[in-house]
Image (tube, rainbow, N blue to C red):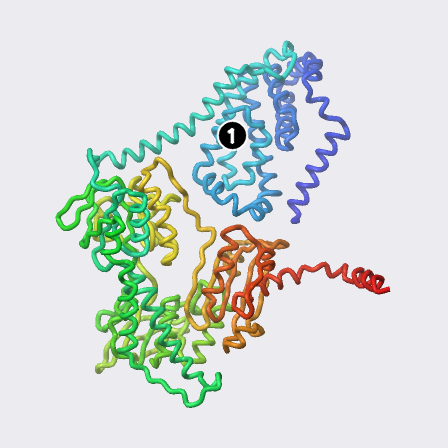
Amino acid sequence: MNKTKFFVVGLITLAIASYFVFDLGQYLSLGFIQSRLASIEEFKNENFALTVLIYFVGYVAVAALSIPGAVILTLLGGAVFGVLWGTLIVSFASSIGATLAFLVSRLLLRDWVQAKFGDYLGSINKGIEKDGDFYLFSIRMVPLFPFFMVNLLMGLTPIRATSFYLVSQLGMLIGTGVYVNAGSELSQISSLSGLVSAPVVLSFVVLGLFPLVAKFFIDAIQRNKIMKKFTRPKKFDANVVVIGAGSAGLVVSLIVAGAKAKVILIEKHKMGGDCLNTGCVPSKAIIRSGRIMSYIRRAKEFGIEAAEGRVNFAQVMGRVQGIIKTIEPHDSVERFTSLGVECISGDARIESPYTVSVNGRRINTRAIVLATGARPLVPPIPGLDQIDYLTSDSIWSLRELPARLLIVGGGPIGCELAQAFSNLGSQVTQVDMAERIMPREDEEVSKVIMQAFERQGIKLLTAHKVLKFGLADGVQFMEAQHEGKTVRVEFDKVLLAIGRKANVEGFGLEELELALNPQGTVEVNEYLQTSYPNIYACGDVAGPYQFTHMASFQAWFASLNAMLGGLWRSKINYNVVPWATFTDPEVARVGLSEQEAIAENIAYEVTRYEMDDHDRSLADGEAHGFVKILTVPGKDKILGVTIVGYHAGEQIGEFVFAMTHGMGLGKISAVTHIYPTLSEANKFAANAWRNARLPVKYFPLAEKFFRWRRG
């Protein structure tokens, strides 16, 4: 506890102790105030300013310390100072005292409450950040809510102190006036119960609800305002039009069609989107071919002599295309048509929030879902137009293995393809501006992958800023800056893998002036609703996570909200987001990493299990990597898990399930895992957490007990 907290706690403790020791509560009773009213009036007439000061300071102290008695003091203010002066003095005193109580609650309790109950308070915090002033104003207008309780509870939220004070000052003004007015007849009041009549209280409730009702109508007016300039069709051709047939668009279409609503799916290129055609599927296929080649080179480790293999790159890429063709029917027009989805091939254009045109046809729809995905980002690097560069979209057209492959980018795509092409025989150089590859992961994770890359001959140029590309005497080259020096790298092919850009151009969003995020993705709220109330977005075009599985996850919420058109809405949450990078070793993560916990100032404990002593990993010749778990201090609640190792992407599923359903390490420790499997490592990691917290100090007593039992 810091000095400030210690001082505040000491001051509060002293004040509360004095309250009870000296029985100060007697001075805040109705009977005592009435018995002293005449003398107080006399003192006020002789010393008005001093009376105001004493009363003001006393009121602030009572409110700040949350001592019962604010109502009595308010009545006294009316009796002594009259309605006008009483209302003025009480209004400021109560608001200042309330704000002090608010600040004390924030200082002493907010960090602890947010750390302990942060998962449950996430949506409340967001609501307070967005509409906290409205909520507080409504509560302040209704005297049914305990004054001191509101002060303390609001201190635990993210609302700003200045907002709290100003809203309290305004919101309590009418109620203060009513009670001060009642205090003008203090001598005739026999009881505080029934002080304010039921009709008056009901009026307060109505007034309190007014801000929320007003906000509802304001939001409705704003929605209508943005839609007013568009003619609403009398009849609709579809309930939902989906633009884009990638992972998000396909899932939305299936859900809407499954609910027996009319859905039209428009795709200008290939069904299945990036994941099937240029992303997840082909990349994992080529990674597998490269991995087989790496095992051939390691054959002696497994007792196999004279193992040989030659890479036929054309056949490797043929296999990639063959796998795409095998999966293609699952995402085909024929399948989706059979499931009730109307599929149209063509360039969609949004003419209005109600109308989409394609191939000369105008479709009136109640809702639109944008699922247009993203594309590789191509930066404006000088000389790039002089060379034949590749992206994660175009690299699959290669049929000859590049002897020298340069990869720009140290993220998941760059790392996966760098290792795959290296395994197949390319001399790979990977360059990135960051100090390390895979910068989103913890430093020790990057170090493991970098060491693995360097062992197999991948040349890593981290902390290198690409300056330009060029072509000299038929040789392509790149120049980069590193520590003030220029580094030149020659290559046969270059792959740009430095990020992805949301597809938001060319189909009408510009004309609609639809709001975008600074990152270029479509701005959506917690319902995946855009700045137009009947246009939704999900997948890579919306972010914030550009993963196929997150696109599918978002699609569920977007489809339900779009179908029901505001009759019922479901909020999306990103509490448990897993992902994996399929390098060798694989890297899988869910929840917080250490570097994120440190950056966000979140307290945590670390439990590790090293895979180099794991039976199945040893048997498979893959005894490397680790399981690292972040937990709430002193508890088994999981904050995040990082796994580095053989098939980490499969292994992490158990932790994803546990976090999704609020299970801790104790539950995982209690599960029987098949021996020998990789998933056993999850149990061993959970056991490591439990073993580190055994009551060691009681072991000597246990030893004596069992010695006694032996006789």
Q: Quadrant of residue 149?
A: top right
Provide the residue designation for mark 1.
Answer: 168
Regarding mark 1 in the picture, which secondary structure is present there? helix
Q: Residue furthest bottom?
A: 306
Q: Position of residue 289 (x, y in %)?
A: 35, 76
Residue at position x 63%, y 31% from top? 66
Q: Residue furthest right?
A: 711
Closest to the observer: 598 or 334?
334
Closest to the observer: 653 or 135?
653
Does 35 sit left or right of 451 as displayed?
A: right
Closest to the observer: 709 or 151?
709
Q: Is 270 placed above or below 136 here?
A: below
- Density class for disc 1 (Cα within 10 Å; few <14, some 14-19, many ≥20) is many
Closest to the observer: 258 or 399?
258
Q: Quadrant of residue 297?
A: bottom left
Residue at position x 24%, y 34% from top? 228
Q: Amino acid at mark 1?
A: Ser
